[in-house]
Image (cartoon, helix red, strand yellow):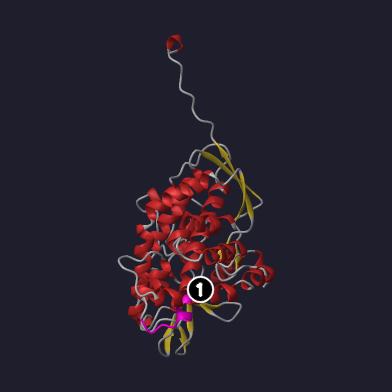
Amino acid sequence: MRRFRRDPLQYIEDCARRAPAAVFRLPWGAWCVRDTELALTVLRDPLFHSGRSTFFGNMLPSRTAQIALGRAVRDLMRAHLPAYRQRMAEAAAGLGPVSQWPGAGPLLVHRCTADVLLHPGAPSALRRQLEQAVTAGLTARQPSMRQRARAELLRPKLLAAIIEHVHDRRAQGPAAGEPQDVLDAVIGAGPEELTDRTVANLYVLLFQSIVGNIGYAVAWSLLLACLHHPPGPPWPWPAEGLVREAARHRPFVWMVGRPVPHALEFGGLPFAAGTILSVSPYLLHHDPHRWDRPEAFRPERWDEPDGQGPYLPFSAGPFTCAGAAVAHSLTTEAVAALGQDARLTVSGGDARPLVSGSVLPRPFTLRRDLKAPVQPALTKGGE
């Protein structure tokens, strides 16, 4: 496992390349589908989607309830985009010349979404607890035991405070009109029989997914752009293509699993019912038969008519993330704001990820130097 820790994605790529079959065994015993066509079958074929999405676990009673909640939160975040854009511009301007990443990513996203995650009328102590949770790294499973322990120490008190607030908010009755925040969306879209604890757990899951996934996607976009472009000149790529390429090159979710519905043969191998078949978006994004020079970081490929292969940073098929388009927009707005009128350089980082449930960037320092404003040319006579 030493090679895996040194460069997890390269290790998985090497395993896939050496595997004689279309499905191969990972070092920890799981099965991974390396053949792109078969992998897309796992993600898209109704055979593998007869039940509920594993994203919500067993917290919701049906796939219908999962879809309703996902859409409610997506619509709320989409409506918040204009306010987010303005706040991100302000937050980027106040970031300072030097910041520490990837931790700065979730903090920045939380600062710009705090009011839609939990509206300003909520208890100020709870809002502070959420901010502390982001600072401690509770938005993703951290790679080191020490980091994980620090983050998990906050979870019991945070969850208890959210449960208490859920109880109080439910006692007040349903909110009139559109939901004020994500917690309103969870309460309103979720079945009435959900316990306060389940509502709180759903809220924490969505909070982590919004703040963590987007924050770390911003970090990857900045790191990869700076590593692949010389310091000084502005980036030659629009933020839209840059964010897409970063999500292709280093997808935050690196493995997606689907259960085998019944005993069957797949990829030439027999599998028992309940066996989890994993698909790696990273492997599909780096398939040389589907992508031109997949190992290269090339945001310009998104402007080429035939430059793209299978793209699934938010999964694919019936269980595609409902908020995929909104998450992409939130990430793009952040990257655009940080690059606006500034020269960005990084030190201390490289493209090898830390894999611990998700694909996280290694720590790096971002330097943001504002460009000098252009002075208006003097007209003849000094007028």
Residue 167 lies, in percent from the top left, at 45, 78
Q: Quadrant of the N terminus?
A: bottom right
Q: How many marks?
A: 1
Query: Above or below — where is 339 with respect to 245?
Result: above
Residue 186 lies, in percent from the top left, at 40, 73
Please give the name of the residue rendered at 38% of the width and 49% of the height, measured from the top-left corner: 304
Please give the name of the residue rendered at 57% of the width and 37% of the height, measured from the top-left corner: 232
User: Which residue extends farthest front?
Assistant: 172
Amino acid at circle 1? Ile
Q: Quadrant of the C terminus?
A: top left
Left or right of 347 in this view: 293: left
User: Is 32 or 127 nearer to us in this picture?
Assistant: 127
User: Which residue extends farthest top?
Assistant: 381
Asked which secondary structure carries label 1, the reply is helix
| Residue 287 in view | no
| Residue 265 falls in image quadrant | bottom left
Residue 198 within the magenta-colored segment of the rendering: yes
| Residue 79 in view | yes
The crowd level at tag 1 (other Cα within 10 Å; few <14, some 14-19, many 20+) is many
| Residue 152 falls in image quadrant | bottom right
User: Is 118 or 318 nearer to us in this picture?
Assistant: 118
Residue 259 lies, in percent from the top left, at 44, 83
| Residue that mark 1 sits on | 162
Please give the name of the residue rendered at 50% of the width and 73% of the height, measured from the top-left corner: 162
Please give the name of the residue rendered at 43% of the width and 10% of the height, measured from the top-left corner: 380
Which stretch did the figure color magenta? 192-200
User: Is 130 or 312 nearer to us in this picture?
Assistant: 130
Residue 4 within the magenta-colored segment of the rendering: no
Residue 335 lies, in percent from the top left, at 48, 49
User: Is 26 or 99 nearer to us in this picture?
Assistant: 99
Query: Above or below — where is 239 with respect to 56?
Result: above
